[in-house]
Image (cartoon, grey):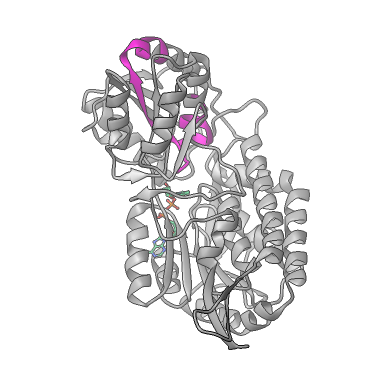
Amino acid sequence: MTESRFPNLIGGAWREAEQWSENRNPSDPSDLVGRFACADLADLGDAISAARQAQYAWAAASPQTRFDVLDKAGDLILARKAQLGDLLAREEGKSLPEAIGEAARAGMIFKFFAGEALRLGGEILPSVRDGIKVEITREPVGLVGAITPWNFPIAIPAWKTAPALAYGNAVVLKPAEVAPGCAWKLAEILVEAGLLAGVFSLVMGPGRVLGAALCQQVDAVSFTGSTGVGHQVLAAATGAGVKVQLEMGGKNPMIVLDDADIDLAVNCALQSAFFSTGQRCTASSRLIVTDGVADRFVERLAAACDALVVGDPRAPGTQIGPVASEAQYASVRGYIDGAVAQGARMVAGAAGSIPNQGLFIRPTLFDRTSPEMTINREEVFGPVASVLRVADYDAALAAANATEFGLTAGICTTSLARAEHFKRHAQAGMVMVNLPTAGVDYHVPFGGRKASSYGAREQGSYAREFFTTVKTAYQSA
Ligand code: NAD
């Protein structure tokens, strides 16, 4: 196998395929990242059978064995974070520092869940009847299907695979077609870390075929991706009686009040709206600003946007890379043109240089937008944000909550009372005060409400809700 050909990992063996897909660098279409094997339904069936067999032995392995494998995988990821980050920047387009940071996060997630393998406790309660002991324990759900998007191509596979393995499950991972290289490297690392053959398989290829089949043939499916596909996964999984967890889109608000520290507010908006090319489910795409500060805020943020360095994410000094695919490019351009047609005022984005090759879009800021504009209702998933001007905090909170999504919500204010009120009343799974809406810790729960999420939370020790099932045992004393 040469490095530019990436076969699937099925039941512990690397397997070639009849169909291969060519993935190219979104900064430079002449750069072939690799040829990736497209699994077919027979490959998927083999991965599922192997996983079902291997899962018993893995669940029976001691917590120390599971700790050792996960901890070693974490060490290997951390030791290779520079190479992994380089691949990530090349296949997905994040700037190199962001990409290396994402790889490091994946490593830390494995190390955290190594520890969780040791910490899975239970409860003993007295029975309501004499002479009986009641034990409540957690067991693996069995075989987990993980379906992941392209925008965090190593962190999201890590945050589904690591807890699944820690709690004794087998995993079949189906990464996104746009950026499967990092998931492939993760598979290679799991083999090197000594994971029992068959416990983890990697099936690359089209989601509408493989993903759709996977979510009906496992015991639990953990999906991250768009809201539309998430609903298809929900219907397929629940129809087949499969436990399901969905993390989907966002249209995250960031409120800036008159009393905000303006430097901090501009920096929070810049970071969370435009970095990672805005391709984050937690991006602040709606900036809700009270009238007293709006002119100053817009002027400062527009200037900061125009100063951002857009270019090859692996070049020193680049802050914003390309969007990840041609489809994404066309979609984001369509939202920009639509916002202009609907009367939004573009205050940053047109000016400034971009390389003439590659899928680059300058960070784009719209002012004087209204809640009914498409730009304020649909997830753009690109370097685009809009300003909604409002009279006061009450109007800002109402506007923040007036969305079908509920992933993150932020506020910039120096008022403790407002901050406390917002934490309690924002209809979102994650709330940020004087911080960007994007950028979260790896050891605490991650997830949203409304159309953004469905099912149990991911990450931190809360992940056990999804990846384990509860058993209640009664014993006569
Ligand atoms: P997507 O929904 O197009 O694809 C996600 C995954 O689903 C891919 O692996 C794809 O191959 C697979 N898939 C496609 N059709 C399928 C089907 N019918 N059945 C099963 N699987 C199928 O999403 P994307 O474009 O890869 O990622 C971007 C989206 O992901 C954005 O909406 C973003 O907000 C969301 N996202 C959410 C979170 C979160 O935690 N809430 C995190 C990152 C990204």
Instruction: Write the residue at 59% across / 50% down.
Output: 32
The range drawn in magenta is: 270-297
Residue 410 x %, y %: 44, 32
Splitting the image into four quadrants, where does ligand 1 fall? bottom left
The reply to whether residue 223 is in sight is yes
Viewer-proximal residue, 370 or 457?
457
Residue 272 x %, y %: 49, 31
Residue 247 x %, y %: 43, 54
Instruction: Write the residue at 27% across / 37% down.
Output: 402
Name the quarter where the N terminus is drawn: bottom right
Asked whether, in this view, residue 366 is left or right of residue 80, the answer is: left
The reply to whether residue 204 is in sight is no
Name the quarter where the C terminus is drawn: bottom right
Count up the numbered dots.
0
Residue 268 x %, y %: 50, 25
Asked whether, in this view, residue 438 is left or right of residue 234, the answer is: right
Whether residue 94 is situated above or below residue 155 in the rendered picture: above
Whether residue 294 is situated above or below residue 122 in the rendered picture: above
Instruction: Write the residue at 56% across / 63% down.
Output: 464
Whether residue 103 is situated above or below residue 186 in the rendered picture: above
Quarter of the image for residue 13 reads bottom right
